[in-house]
Amino acid sequence: MSNVATLTRRELQATFFSPIAYVVGTGFLLISGYFFLTQVLVPGNEASMRPLFDNMAKLLVFAIPLLTMRSLAEELSTGTVETLMTAPVTDAQVILGKFAGLMLFYVVLLATTLVHAVLLLAYAQIPWQAVAMGYAGLLLLGAAFVAIGLFASTLTRYQLLAALIGAGLLAALTFLMDYLASWWGGDWRTITSAMNLLAHFDDFSKGILDTKAIVLLASVTTFFLFLAVKVLESRRWR
Amino acid sequence: MIDVKNLTKYYGQRPAIDNISFHVDRGQIVGFLGPNGAGKTTTIRILTGYMPATAGSARIAGYDVFSQSLQARGQIGYLPESVPLYTDMRVREYLTFRAKLRGMGRSDRASAIRRVTGMCWLEDVIDRPIGQLSKGFRQRVGLADALIHDPAVLILDEPTVGLDPTQIREMRNLIRSLGGKHTIMLSSHILPEVEATCDRTIIVAGGRIVASGTVAQLRQQIIGGSRVIAEIKGPTQAMCQEIGKISGARKVEANEDGEWTRLLIETAGKDIREDVAQLAARRGWPLREIRLEVGSLEEFFVQVVARQHEEQKQKASAA
């Protein structure tokens, strides 16, 4: 367990030191600030953060792969993976440590958007429960996205490629599924809309606590972390 | 300490190492010598638990590198060839991070870092970012990392590559001083390096062990043994005949140089300088030079590698 904590610290530090994290963080805050101004902080509108949450979730499809692309791809390209994987740590500890480190960075990024809620508070009564639920949803959705991005980063030593694979996977599990669900009917529609991760986030942003969504997002996270461990293990056999 | 049995590793269809077996005793310094692509790094990566072997087994301090990988890795300090480091970290941070991964407590870490920075002359750069350090310092940081947990076995892949002559000498002295306390295996394609630092040498070529032993033992194996070179004034043909009769002389080659004759006498490992000198004195032939030329490890290395290459070519054409 202490190994995971050590690796978590290292990952968090590496993320904080990389310029890309600041570029992505700034971009994310600017764009979500724009959504806040145009869709939430509008006189006469309902005092709800929901439009902001929905747009932030969509934004994460592109922001998170840029945050996670470095994680393993950099170790693979600089060769530090060799010293890491010959130290007495398991592959699962490596992945878990990196996941936790990236999640901490994501939580910090998410926390900075709380400023929007504070701004809103100056003009209106805020439905705190709904806001809390929205953030819980963003946390769970983000965890699934980070796991997918981390998995993409184990596949290649090229960071750009890792970001493209990550964003591609995320877009497939969100926008593509949404699009397919709108086209197809019957069973296919049920399946594709169930695979749309953003649809599961929808409940949260409405302020509903749905165990189905929690279980699904947690399962997606676990599944992709498991895949990442397997890919890392398989790298040894090549 | 290191026990390797029938180790084989295939990359696709091509064997990188083919049925390698060797043993290294506690406290020994062993040089793993071979041309580029001989399978040195592959063997080392299997030993350090970075990749599994296709067949065979390897044990480090009694732990199997595959089934008891974590325990085996705990016994090893490893310096990879490319010396990969986190360039965004400071030296102290990096060593702390690595010591933590080794499960060392706070007070252990502090004393271990003090010990390895002293050993590897890192005091002046301890608080500098690794990205700013020169190749020589990075190599030392890598070695300090390998030594931080005071491992039983130290595995160094090409530890002097990219260093300047002074640094190479320092590195060799450091490695020598670590022998005895640690069991060391270092790979190299530079002969004098192995000659200067190692108790024993294992020569690999084409994924196989082609020779192994101490430097002295390897010298004895040199094909053709040593040569005596003599410059004598006299009738060339008669000289060749008479010297050829001396017991221990195998083949005599003569090169005429004005009125002097330069004789290259191949011997069967016996020093026959005295016999040659006595013969010349008896016949009244003036002798102006006589010396024994001992075959170098370098020559031996080139020979065995060439032979291995030849065998592989034959096998390929036969198949």
Image: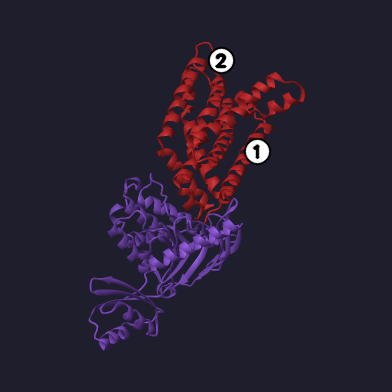
Chain colours: A red, B purple
Q: Which one is nearer the viewer's eye here, A233 or A142?
A: A233
Amino acid type assigned to the residue bearing label 2 in the image: Glu
What element does badge 1 sit on? Answer: helix
Give the vertical position of B47 relative to B252 (above or below): above
Estimate how packed mark 2 is, as few (under 14), some (14 to 19) or many (20 or more) residues with alpha carbons within 10 Å. some
x and y percentages locating residue A135 in the rendered image = 55, 30
Confirm whether circles 2 and 1 share one chain: yes
Q: Is residue B226 above or below residue B146?
A: below
Front position in the image: B98 or B76:
B76
Q: Secondary structure at mark 2?
A: loop
Tell me the residue that label 1 is attached to.
A219
- Rate crowding at label 1 as few (under 14), some (14 to 19) or many (20 or more) other CA atoms within 10 Å: few
Residue with the mark numbered 2: A46
Q: Are marks 2 and 1 in contact (CB under 8 Å)?
A: no
Tell me if residue B75 can be seen: no
Location of residue A90 in the rendering, given as x and y in whole percent from the top left corner: 56, 53
Residue A179 in the image: state x and y as whole percent: 65, 21
For the point 46% across and 65% down, the residue is B304
Q: Chain of mark 2?
A: A
Q: Is residue B104 left or right of residue A212?
A: left
Quadrant location, the C terminus of chain B: bottom right
Compare residues B306 and A129 and report the one nearer the observer: B306
Name the chain letter of the residue that bears numbered label 1. Answer: A
Q: Quadrant of residue B8?
A: bottom right
Q: Residue at x 55, y 49 (%)?
A: A93
Could you say which disc has been placed on residue A36 in the image? none
Q: How many marks?
A: 2
Q: Residue drawn at (55%, 40%), measured in percent from left and top?
A: A155
Q: Earlier in the sequence, mark 2 or mark 1?
A: 2
Viewer can see residue B251: yes
Vertical arrangement, residue A33 with respect to residue B288, above or below: above
